[in-house]
Amino acid sequence: MKGYAMLKIGESGWIEKERPKCGPLDAICKPLALAICTSDVHTLWEGAIGERHNMILGHEGCAEVVEVGELVKDFKPGDRVLVPAITPDWNSLEAQAGFSMHSGGMLAGWKFSNFKDGVFSEFFHVNDADGNLALLPDNINTVDACMLSDMVPTGFHGAELADVQYGDVVLVIGIGPVGLMSVAGANLRGASRIIAVGTRQVCVDAAKGYGATDFISYKNGPIDEQVMKMTNGKGVDKIIIAGGGVETFSPAVKCLKPGGKIGNVNYLGSGENIDIPRAEWGVGMGHKQINGGLMPGGRLRMEKLSALVSAGKLDLSPLSTHVFEGWDHIEEALFLMRDKPADLIKPVIKIQD
Ligand code: NAD
Ligand code: ZN
């Protein structure tokens, strides 16, 4: 079979590989549609997960099941399925402790294009099919379905980590596709005012649609100063970080109310430490929590999040700004994600209707 792979850090291309084998609990799937992630860019060009040779890329897509192991109960060949980016081992101790995304070690629930070949391939392997796949609802198209692999679960997890409650004033730092889903998640959880940090017009328009009420630019001076001014010196109840680097934490702590919570879902690719400003952290006694997490994957999560889309409560169509048809466009879409033109949110490739 053919797959689009990371040949080594900084180099990618098509390779031939053997079709993966299906274990008793597993499924083999073929893609219906695929999406490119900022993480693919981090992996390939920035060496975010270290060196990999001939590893097929990709962890976002929806698919058709072509084979299942003899112990798989709920899926069969021909089923159209949602595929989460994170596919935990559900019988692991970490999963039993409530942190399935770290099954087998920190971040090890992330298997596609990390510990094994990803989904940019004619066929790909899914471990624990009953625990990780979910049926693709009939009223969700394959392009929107790709957003359920990673963008929705990650963005929404930001809102969970920040523990957004009814009426909260929420700051969302970074409104790429993940941050946009954090805006949507915060809105669904009942935030009142949602201040978004971002200026690209396509993202600002989408963020307004998802419930953002105010906008600021990190290019117009320190975020905390702008936020304190807009909130009459009070600060915000909750903060979701979905963009920037280690430098975003200090201003976040500064404009967070005592008792506030920060939920980070951003990948921190460089810098040794994160600065926590001592005085604004209440000299150690401000009850300002900082939480960071990898998205939860698995079937239940996919079913619940897709139910929001099916029920018309979450419109994913604004995210897929660039839709291509056919395998030939994978490379173009990947390079587009690296170069991030101003009108791009997510590139998606339709493989089969
Ligand atoms: P993106 O690059 O499209 O969006 C990030 C946005 O942040 C950009 O629009 C950028 O302009 C903006 N930004 C940069 N510096 C900023 C600053 N100082 N303040 C405010 N905004 C700033 O990326 P994305 O696809 O939306 O993903 C966001 C992050 O989430 C990435 O780091 C990605 O690797 C990570 N991610 C995490 C998980 C997870 O499970 N936790 C899953 C997927 C992606
Ligand atoms: Zn992703």
Image: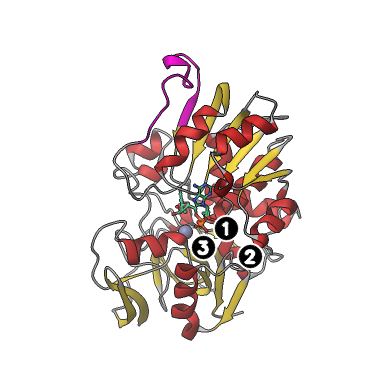
> Residue 234: x, y in percent?
65, 23
Does the residue at mark 3 contact the one at mark 2 (Cβ under 8 Å)?
A: no
Which of the 4 image quarters holds residue 335?
bottom left
Callout 3 amino acid: Phe
Tell me the number on the disc at residue 23.
none
> Residue 233: x, y in percent?
65, 24
Residue extent of the magenta highlight:
274-290
Q: Does the residue labelled 2 lie within 8 Å of ligand 2?
A: no
Residue at the disc numbered 1: 148
Mark 1, mark 3: which one is toward the viewer? 1
Residue at the disc numbered 3: 75
From the viewer's perspective, is residue 215 above or below residue 226? below
- Pick whichever, 227 or 86, lies toward us: 227
Is residue 217 rendered to the left or right of residue 124? Answer: right
Residue 23 visible from this viewpoint:
no
Q: Residues within 10 Å of mark 2 (few under 14, many from 20)?
A: many
- Pick whichever, 10 or 297, lies toward us: 10
Q: What element carries label 3?
A: loop
Callout 1 amino acid: Leu
Q: How crowded is mark 1: few (under 14 residues within 10 Å), some or many (20 or more)?
A: many
Is residue 48 one of those drawn in magenta? no
The overriding secondary structure of the stretch rendered in magenta is loop
> Residue 270: x, y in percent?
33, 48
Residue located 55% across and 46% down the image: 218
Is residue 280 one of those drawn in magenta? yes
> Residue 259: x, y in percent?
56, 20
Marks 1 and 3, how far apart in space? 19 Å
Image quadrant holding the N terminus, namely: bottom left
User: Furthest residue to the front?
Assistant: 221
Residue at the disc numbered 2: 144
